[in-house]
Image (spheres, rainbow, N blue to C red):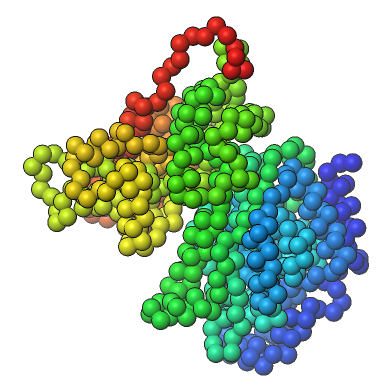
Amino acid sequence: MTAVRRARDLARAALPRSVGERLPAAPPPEVTELLHDKRFQRAVAEQAEEQGRPEAEVWEEVKGYLHEMSAAHDDRASQGWTRMGEWFLRAYDVLVDEDEMQKLRRVDRDHSLALAFSHRSYLDGMVIPNALSARRFSPTYTFGGANLNLPVIGSVASRTGLIFIRRATQEIPVYRLALRSYIRQMVTNKRNLAWSIEGGRTRTGKLRPPVHGILKYLTDTVEGADAPDVQVVPMSVVYDQLHEVSLMTQEARGASKTPEDWRWLVRFARLQRNRLGRAYLTVGEPFSLRERMAELAAEGVTGHQAVERVALDISHRLNRATPVTVTAIVSLALLGADRAMTMDEVLETVEPLATYIESRDWPVAGAADLRDRSTIRRALSELARSGVLTSYDGGTEPVWKIGDDQHLVAAFYRNTVIHILVERAIGELALLTVSELEPGAELPPGGELQVGWEEAKRMRDLLKFEFFFPGRAGFEDDLRTELQLLVGEDVTGLTPGRARELLVTARPHLSHLVLRPFLEAYLVLADRLADRGDAEVDEDDLLADSLAVGRQWALQRRVASEESISLELFRTALALARHRGLMDGGDGVGTAREAFAAELRDSVRRVNIIGEIAGELAPSVPEPRHTQESR
């Protein structure tokens, strides 16, 4: 049976009525209750008055939007949708944190849950509802983009709790009113809601900056003395591998995004025929949204700033809940080497990473042993089978390397774990900065150690659009912990010579593995920006120029890896340049642009020094062997 026939048959089997119907004849209770709600009626009247339109006309518009976005849970449709989800997930074994799920189920009995999930795949929208349904949670209503409201499938999905919403609504105030009010009514009725805090799939593997739309409506809902509360629950979904990553990396190199239609769905379904390992669903620490908003208000943080703080709270908890996969660690090792490695060399690289992960108490997916030879070999074999790695076994022992044009794919997998390594990498650069101080150099109050702190804060500011950092005080506390782990002693009274000695002997070295791809991408864009002097800059033209010149630099080996040549990274660099006021033309801006490029060149230089230190400590090339025992 073809993928298209299978998908259509599963969808039609789930339809409780004719395909042409968008919803059951009777609207969901939330819509009926909302239409009779006095508060909502006043809001509609105020909207009509504000726009100078007849109230009846605005009511018709509101009803149309509610009809478009409303969803229900039909038993037959939900059962069929579950079967379809299992079919789409046939490439994976789904592992769920059962202990945390049991705790969450107890919360589900008395509260509305707001499930904020990370978004790496279209499959996320099947993993989470299926896992919750199988454990008898209250029905979940999941927000999804209106672009996924396909014929037949969309009709079924709306009967299984999928709420299709539009993305661009700034110019549609009546739509925003309808959505805000619908969400409030859902929470009042203790419905469970799920949405991607990132607003869309990550193209890099790491968590994207949060989008505030749904969260803003939820915070509005819980405000007031008699307002209902919700328990915000971060949920992380991570995969050993994903079929769709190769398509996303093509977009990162400038290809157009494939539109979601039936042909796209069929191709996506066909891809899932090939096994790719496991998917891991983990639960972060829940919290009361009403209590969190009250805490922030007591600190004087309100309005949009409060929503931003809550969004960052969710993002930090998501990162903390995301487990380390073996795929991510193997990708990290091979990307750092950017050459073929033997099994022993991979294990040699992974071992200090495993020690560090244990010391920081980070969870490992499936409780895998990162030092186990068979575990690492299995990951290498699976990555080779999917084409991410190439292998060669015609010599004395097998070797593996990143495949041609697969660096961005491997980087995607590495980036699922990169958040746990960033502060450690910055700590290395702080030590390096202290080690480079000239004898007799003028020092700030606090001495050599303060020089290191300032370098760390500079790197934090440089990368703040790329990673989630705690506040400055929290960042300094975290960095102090990282330095303690890095050097194994108190860093008070640090001297340049001692800093160099500690840096050389510390393991693992991470700056070149973790930060270099981002800094080199930033440098490419900064170089092209500086080339424009004081002139006005067209952002699309700058991105295209960066992509073209970046490809040249990769061919010339002026950047360490092809993964730096990515539109996603260039766009983040662009956001940083815009934040620094470098995108508008004018007298003197060319000098500021040159300074921006010079700062990045120096940052790349420092990271390369860490790479050289790590290279000095790397295992030496073994003597030729006349046996093949390692095969």
How many numbered tags mark residues here?
A: 0
Coordinates of residue 171 in the picture (x, y in percent): 56, 72
Write the residue at 52% across / 9% down: 625
As drawn, the residue found furthest toward the left would be 440
Write the residue at 14% across / 54% down: 444
Coordinates of residue 331 in the picture (x, y in percent): 53, 35
Coordinates of residue 184 in the picture (x, y in percent): 64, 80
The relative height of residue 320 versus residue 325 in the rendered view (above or below) is below
Write the residue at 85% across / 79% down: 26
The relative height of residue 528 versus residue 228 in the rendered view (above or below) is above
The relative height of residue 231 versus residue 60 in the rendered view (above or below) is above
As drawn, the residue found furthest toward the front would be 489
Between 103 and 419, which is closer to the camera in this rendering? 103
Write the residue at 66% across / 75% down: 112
Q: In the visual, does 469 lie left or right of 350?
A: left
The relative height of residue 31 versus residue 600 in the rendered view (above or below) is below
Coordinates of residue 588 in the picture (x, y in percent): 22, 53
Please state, as top left, top right, bottom left or bottom right, where the C terminus lies in the image. Answer: top right
Q: Residue 195 sits in which quadrant?
A: bottom right
Is residue 462 visible to the viewer in this orientation of the structure? no
Please state, as top left, top right, bottom left or bottom right, where the N terminus lies in the image. Answer: top right
Q: Residue 157 sits in which quadrant?
A: bottom right
Between 340 and 8, which is closer to the camera in this rendering? 340
Is residue 478 visible to the viewer in this orientation of the structure? yes
